[in-house]
Amino acid sequence: MTTTLTRSTARTPVGNSLTAGQLPKWMPWVLLAGALALSSIVFAIMNGGGDVADFNIAAAVFVGVVLFAVVLVILSSVVETRRRAADRLATVLVSIAFTIALLPLISLLFTVVVNGIARFDPMFFSYSMRNIVGEGGGAIHAIYGTLIVTGWATLISVPIGLMTSIYLVEYGRGRLAKAITFFVDVMTGIPSIVAGLFIVAVCALIYGPGLNTGFMGSLALSVLMIPVVVRSSEEMLRLVPNELREASYALGVPKWLTIVKVVLPTSVAGITTGIMLSISRVIGETAPLLLTAGFTQSLNVNAFDNPMMTLPVFVYDQFQNPGTNIPAALERAWAGALTLIIIVMALNLIARFVAKKFAPKFGR
């Protein structure tokens, strides 16, 4: 007797509670865009067609994100599973916290762009404030001064800070290394005006009182930059695996050449980022430059002779001493602040490019 066993090739679909009834991936982004647009419209109506500068961008973004979070969680609880809805709730809570942290930055950028874009014209980038009393004028002298002063400060600070970090990581042992680390930590927290007073006192002892030059401003900024470069470079150098150093030593390569050819190229991305952070830290300093670089309304490209205007001091001067035409001076001040932000952004983009271009490739 032959028994025939028939197996059904059809399979009954099994429901998966983790994947059933999911929202489309594009749905959260559409909800976020719609919530922000709706919130912006409401706050624009509340603004009553007034000046764009009076628009409350921080409140609009916050209300929009909260509205997005509520709608997304409700929609997820209806369409998706309970576990998925709980996951959405945790995600939107983190997003709200992140948005709250970003609100000051969003408000700052919006205010600077709205108030500074009015004077972003060719005259602003081609004229100085020499013989300007009312409208007109520009900040070309301050832009040149910022680039020159910051450039000299970078040339002074980067070699000193990088060599100090190399000593602490590769050679430093005992009390001397601990003392250097302690003083670097102390220098990291000193007020910026103290650095300016220190440089003024030193130069007054050497050259006499009343001297203001761009190079003095560079020295003051380097006092603030060096500890930042040291700490950031030190952390990056410590992240280099010791196996790379040992492999180089095993091949008979001396220590200094191992540092130059192995350690520094491996950590160049992090070191570059740290240098850019230190530049961003000091490029907007006003107090030390008020004491060292001084004021001038004319273009000066010689850092070793006569005062040199910088963008932070230019913004301060336009707010503090607006002259006969206050609105024109305020427009120049906001435009100077926007220019400073753009310079910092450009430096960070350059740093990212350099880090990506020269970072070691570990692919096979």
Image: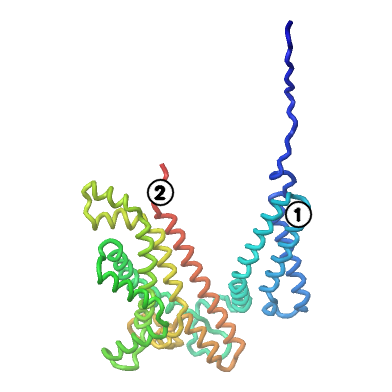
Report whether 59 appears left or right of 116: right
Judging depth in this view, the residue of 182 and 5 nearest the camera is 5
Q: Earlier in the sequence, mark 1 or mark 2?
A: 1
Q: Secondary structure at mark 1?
A: helix
The spot of residue 136 in percent (x, y) is 56, 84
Describe residue 20's horizontal placement relative to residue 311 as left or right.
right
**Rendered position, 298 above or below 173:** below
Q: Amino acid at mark 2?
A: Lys
Mark 1 surroundings: few (<14), some (14-19) or many (≥20) residues within 10 A: some
Locate residue 254: give its quadrant: bottom left
Q: Please, what secondary structure does the residue beneath circle 2 have?
A: loop
Badge 1 amino acid? Ser
CA gap, disc 1 and disc 2:
45 Å
Asked whether residue 141 is in view, the answer is no
Q: Nearer the viewer, residue 226 or 141?
A: 226
Q: Residues within 10 Å of mark 2 (few under 14, many from 20)?
A: few
Quadrant of the rendered image containing residue 296:
bottom left
Q: Which residue is mark 1?
A: 77
The residue drawn where x is 34% and y is 88% is: 200
Q: Which residue does the image show at 74% across and 5% down from the upper left? A: 1
- Residue 361 in view here: yes
- Image position, residue 259 (x, y; %): 28, 57
Residue corresponding to mark 2: 361
Residue 77 coordinates in the image, percent (x, y):
75, 54
